[in-house]
Structure formats: C-alpha cells, structure tokens
Amino acid sequence: MEDRQPIYSLNNSQDGLVSGEPSPEEQEWTDKGNAAAEAENYLEAADAFQHAVALNPGNARSRYNLALAQQLHGDTENAIAGYRRAIDLDPQLIDAYTNLGNLYGELGLQEEALETFQQGLEFDPDNDELYASVGDTYAQQYLYTDAIQAYRQALILNGDNGGAADNLRDVRERVNYQTRRVMEQEKHIDENPADAIRYAELVNLYLDMHRYDDAISAANQILGLEPDDRAGYDALASIYEAMGDRDQAAEAYQRIVEIAPDDAEAWEHLGTWRSLQDDTDAATGAYARSVQIDPARYTARFSLAETYLDSERYEEARQVYQGLLDDANALDSDDLAAAYSGLADAYNSLGQHDEAIRTSQTLLEQFEDDPEGYYQLATAYDAQGNYDEAIETYRKAIHSDPLNADYYNDLADTLREAKRYNEALEAAQQAIAMDPSLTLAYETLAQVYEETGHPEEAAAAMEQANTLKSAQE
C-alpha cells in the first residue's frame, strides 16, 4: 500500500501556527513560537508555546500549537497528551484529530487512531482526508471491507484524492489475493475431505479475512472429524480470541486443558480469559496450575501476581513478585523492572510504605526514569502525607509516561490534598482528556470544585462519574 504522508497542519488559516485570541503577553510568546517554528527550531517553538499555555491554560489553540511543535520535534507522547487536552477544550479543532490519529498510527495504536479519526468526522463529516485516514487504519488491521468503504467515501467527497484512489486499488488487490487463496485451499480439501489439517489451514485463511462465521464452520468440521482431539478446540480458541468473545474463548480453553491437562500454555490462556470474565478464583487457579506445571513460565507467574493484586490478596502477590526477583538472573530487563514495580505495588497495598519506597528506589537505581518506579514511589510518599515529594515524583512519572491517565488523576488528588487547587484542576482535566471513561478522575474533579466553592460544577462532574459507573456495571 502506498504510504500517504501524515497531514501535520500548521493552522486553520494560511499563515503560521494557530494563535487564537491571546492576551498581549500570550501573543508575544505565540509570535516567538511561530518564528521558531518557521525556522524549523521546534524545541525552541515548544518552549515558547509552553509559556503561552502557562499564561492561559484554557486556550485550546495554544495547546494545539504546543502539541504540534512537540510532534515535529519528535516528542510524540507529550504531543499526544497535548492534542487530547486541546480536543477536550475545543472538540471542533479538526487538525488536532488528524495529527493525533496519525501519531497513534505511528505508534501502532490502530484502534485509538481509528477512534480519533471517527471522532473528527463527527464534527467534519465532509473531510475526505479523514475518511482516507480511516481507510488506512482499517487496512493496517486487515479489515479490508471496511477500508474499501472508507476509501470510497473519501473519493465521493473528493474524486481527486489520489492517495485514497491508490490505496483503494491496493486493498482490492489484497482482497482478491485472499479470495484466490481460499479457493485454492477449498480445492485442496476437496481432494481429501477427511484430512482435518486441511481445514485448519482454511481456518487460518478465514481468520486473516475476519470471516469468523466461516472460520467457526471450518473448526467444527475438524471437531466432526476428530472429536476427541484438541485440534478443533485450538482452532475455536484462536477464532474466539480474535473475536474477543471471552465466554467462548474460556470454554474452548477449558476443553483444551481437559484433553491436555499438562499444557502450561493452555492453562495460562484459560487464566487470561477467566480473568476477563471477572472469575478471579478460576483465573487464579488456572495461572497457579500453569506455574505448577512449568515454574519457568514467567508470564504466568506475573499474571498470577497481578490477579492476586486485583483480588486484594496482597501478601500472596508480594510472595510471587519476590519469587520472581529471586529468579532475577532468568528475567530480561523489562520483566525485572516489572517485578520490582509489582513488589512495590504489593507493599503499598499492604500499607508497608517504607518497604515500597526502598523497592521503588532500587528499581530506579537500576532503571532510570522507569515510570512505574516513580509512580509507586509517589504513591508511598502520598500515603505518608509527604505531599511535596509525592507531587514532584508523580510529575516524574508523567514525564516518563505522559499517556497514563491514572498518573494525572493521582497527581490531581494529591494536589487537592495539598490545597493547590488550580494545579489539581488542570491535572484532573488532563486525566479526563487522556481517558474520558476514567470515573475516578471525574470524582477528583468534583472534589476540587466542591472544595473551591463551585457546587454546580461539582454536581455536574459527579453526575458524569455516576453515569460512567452505571454504564460500566
């Protein structure tokens, strides 16, 4: 597929970055940022726009300018956070949707990219470039039928959109190629309809095409031929996993472990889907069985520890994380850092904050700027009432991972405890911008409004929190 260059629009007009209607001082910094951007000095531009944002945090266009400068400088994650906040302030800032979606795509976050482009289309339904971007995103996920429809809509809106036309032809070629492969495999099956392996190949082809009903039919053919073998259930498991059907996936893996009770990998998969069913006891049992069969299966040990944390079995979680650290020589660097942060989390959950601090500091000594290390350290400081240290450390966590909404929310709550209300308001709003479904952030926002004498705003925030709770239940 031909790669279309991302559209990094500089403004909604034709001259310089978007400036909005700033105060004289804000305008001065905006002008400095524009000049630096025109000279392609994006780091200097970002610094200038940061000053403009500080003067007027509610100006969406200043936020957009800062995010764009960060994007062009290569500061991708902070750019994403900035675009989300700009959109939160001005939902009709279409360029922000375009740039944000492209950034998500560059990071391989295709679902987030698609959602962003579609949100932009709600405000600008005649934007052919947004439809072309939707098509690109579907194509990246091999959802070719959806991609074709999006490209067609882009061409309906603008018949001269060459990128959409080229990519439409490319996707059509891919669909035709997939269809030919299916026909060839069907012919191969006709030569020996009793060969279950040939149906398994057909299942894989249908999965690539997202033709799930056909894939299930082929898997059932395998079961009909070999009802006592696991091959058919393996096929069903892969299909239901691709569909995200947690109940059917769990049932498939349950049948697999009954047939192959010593398969540690199957037990681990069963644990994953039981966890997604919110069946914590069954998930814990499956993970524990996986670890019992294969103690070197570290992914299952991590999942077991996380499930213990989620079910408030903190001491058991601590023991598993400590056991992982006892096997530190067998862990890669990412797993070692995760074991330290998990152990610190367990200590915090147990109320053993001094131990959490020591563990977090050990993590940070080995892995500088690890966001979870800073987060667990900040959590411990917060629990001890050491708000200044907690605030500084939460900010370090955010600097290392600007896309984590929980970090912003916990920072907001600590700023509220410290009665730094303006900063708390900004952090809570940023948390909501990063994750509009984060109920806790609305509750934090409501507390800030309540404590600053804004009962109507507090009530509105709590209403949103309650609406989200109801929807999640």
Image (spheres, rainbow, N blue to C red):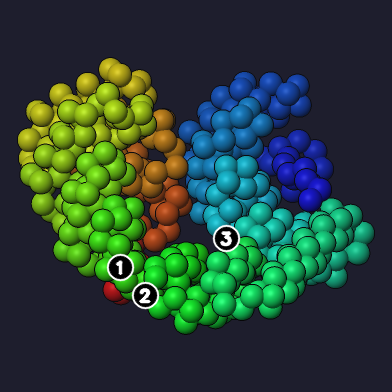
Q: Judge whether residue 162 can be spotted in this image.
A: yes
Instruction: Give the class, few, some or many, for how many residues have Cα within 10 Å of label 3's Cα (few <14, many ≥20).
Output: some
| Disc ID at residue 228 | 2
Q: Earlier in the sequence, mark 2 or mark 1?
A: 2
Q: Which residue is mark 1?
A: 259
Contact, CB < 8 Å: mark 2 with mark 1? Answer: yes
Q: Nearer the viewer, residue 52 or 415?
A: 415
Q: Judge whether residue 25 can be spotted in this image.
A: no
Q: Earlier in the sequence, mark 1 or mark 3?
A: 3
Residue 212 drawn above or below residue 458 = below
The outermost residue toward the right is: 160
Residue 457 drawn above or below residue 291 = below
Q: Nearer the viewer, residue 78 or 359?
A: 359
Instruction: Give the class, few, some or many, for how many residues have Cα within 10 Å of label 1's Cα (few <14, many ≥20).
Output: some
Point 71% across, 56% down: residue:
136
Could you say where residue 285 lies in the image, as x and y percent from the top left? 17, 59
Could you say where residue 193 lies in the image, as x and y percent from the top left? 61, 78
Q: Which residue is mark 3?
A: 115
**Mark 2 and mark 1: span between their CA atoms?**
8 Å
